[in-house]
Image (cartoon, grey):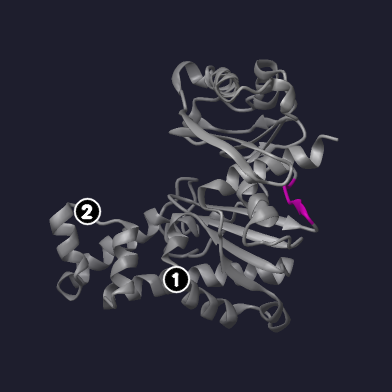
């Protein structure tokens, strides 16, 4: 479930997507229509494909923000119109008459990559989503690390620049999200262009389009633009530094990079690996594989289906 759209899918016990579609996320009336809209969308799709609700074992859902897994309560989702401690699971079960399991959206992406993606069944895995923000999911011995109040795995809010970092949406300064997200990359690029405008073709892109995107920076780096490469190197430095700290703590088998920024591929992955090797404890860097996610936008729904597979006997 996202702030703009909610992605839905019917998925079988083998993790195969049978049908997928999306609906707008309705923020009106403090988000009170969201669960009803989901229920209606499920019923409509069942009618379209000629199936009964009895075919469904349950619903798994990834939602933004900290989630209390045991109760299915969303602790904070201001962008959806929900006030603190919103009882999402109970409302979804009431609307659909199906058992529901709620998890943080980045955690669902991590579970999806573990089950059917780049994790390839690894039981100790860290997934980092590099999108508009930076999300994370930590899997230890096959289970998501949720923490005492559902805020485990908030990798984007690890402080990477404690002394001179930019202000993050969370209220802190210097979070990894302010550097390694698409938003952070654009900020770094605009700051660099303010000083070195004549040295990069990014200035032509900005003048032509009125703005630059993270994709513009990545494409320019791939084409050898020196300023763009310098920006990617800075992003990679702090991302590799933070990932090394996480790996030194958890000793995961794999670190999976997902989200739109990860589509940069080797131009990002290679320098991140280099910086990770620089900062990681020797036994850790020898046993940790860093790779790009493979499921794309399907990771979340597949991970949400895994919640049902795990919990419904």
Residue 143 position in % (x across, y down): 77, 51
Q: Quadrant of the C terminus?
A: top right
Q: Which mark is residue 268?
A: 1
Query: Image point 75% across, 26% down: which residue?
Result: 99
Residue 109 position in % (x across, y down): 60, 49
Read off the residue under disc 2.
211
- Indicate which disc, 2 or 1, sits on the residue closer to the N terminus: 2
**Relative to 235, is 229 on the left or the right?**
left
| Res 102 → quadrant | top right
Q: Is residue 60 magenta?
A: no
- Which residues are the magenta region? 142-147
Relative to 98, residue 251 above or below: below
**Relative to 254, is 25 on the left or the right?**
left
SS at mark 1 in the image: helix
Q: Quadrant of the N terminus?
A: top right
SS at mark 2 in the image: loop
Relative to 309, residue 36 above or below: above
Residue 269 position in % (x across, y down): 49, 72
Query: Image point 72% across, 44% down: which residue?
Result: 306
Q: Dot 2, crowdedness within 10 Å: few (<14), some or many (≥20)? A: some
**Relative to 187, is 209 on the left or the right?**
left
């Amino acid at each position: 479930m996202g702030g703009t759209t909610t992605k839905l899918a019917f998925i079988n016990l083998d993790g195969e997507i049978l049908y997928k579609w999306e609906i707008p996320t309705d923020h009106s009336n403090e988000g009170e229509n969201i669960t009803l809209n989901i229920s209606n969308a499920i019923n409509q799709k069942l009618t379209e494909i000629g199936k009964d609700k009895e075919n469904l074992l349950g619903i798994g859902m990834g939602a933004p923000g900290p989630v209390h897994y045991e109760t299915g309560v969303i602790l904070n989702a201001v962008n959806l119109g929900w006030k603190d401690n919103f009882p999402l699971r109970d409302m979804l079960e009431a609307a659909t008459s199906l058992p529901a399991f709620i998890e943080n959206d980045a955690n669902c992406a991590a579970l999806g990559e573990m089950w059917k993606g780049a994790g390839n069944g690894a039981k100790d895995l860290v997934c980092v989503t590099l999108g508009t923000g930076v999300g994370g999911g930590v899997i230890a011995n096959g289970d998501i690390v949720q923490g005492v109040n559902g805020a485990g795995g908030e990798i984007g809010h690890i402080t990477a620049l404690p002394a001179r970092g930019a202000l993050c949406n969370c209220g802190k300064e210097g979070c990894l999200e302010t550097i390694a997200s698409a938003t952070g990359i654009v900020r770094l690029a605009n700051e660099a262009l303010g000083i070195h405008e004549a040295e990069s073709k990014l200035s032509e892109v900005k003048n032509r389009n009125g703005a630059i995107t993270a994709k513009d920076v990545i494409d320019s780096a791939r084409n050898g633009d020196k300023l763009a490469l310098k920006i990617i190197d800075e992003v990679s430095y702090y991302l590799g530094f933070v990932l090394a700290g996480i790996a030194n703590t958890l000793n995961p088998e794999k670190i999976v990079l997902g989200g739109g920024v990860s589509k940069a591929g080797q131009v990002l992955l290679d320098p991140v690996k280099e910086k990770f090797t620089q900062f990681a404890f020797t036994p850790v860097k020898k046993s940790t594989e860093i790779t790009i996610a493979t499921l794309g936008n399907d990771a979340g729904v597949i991970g949400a289906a895994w919640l049902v597979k795990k919990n419904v006997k």
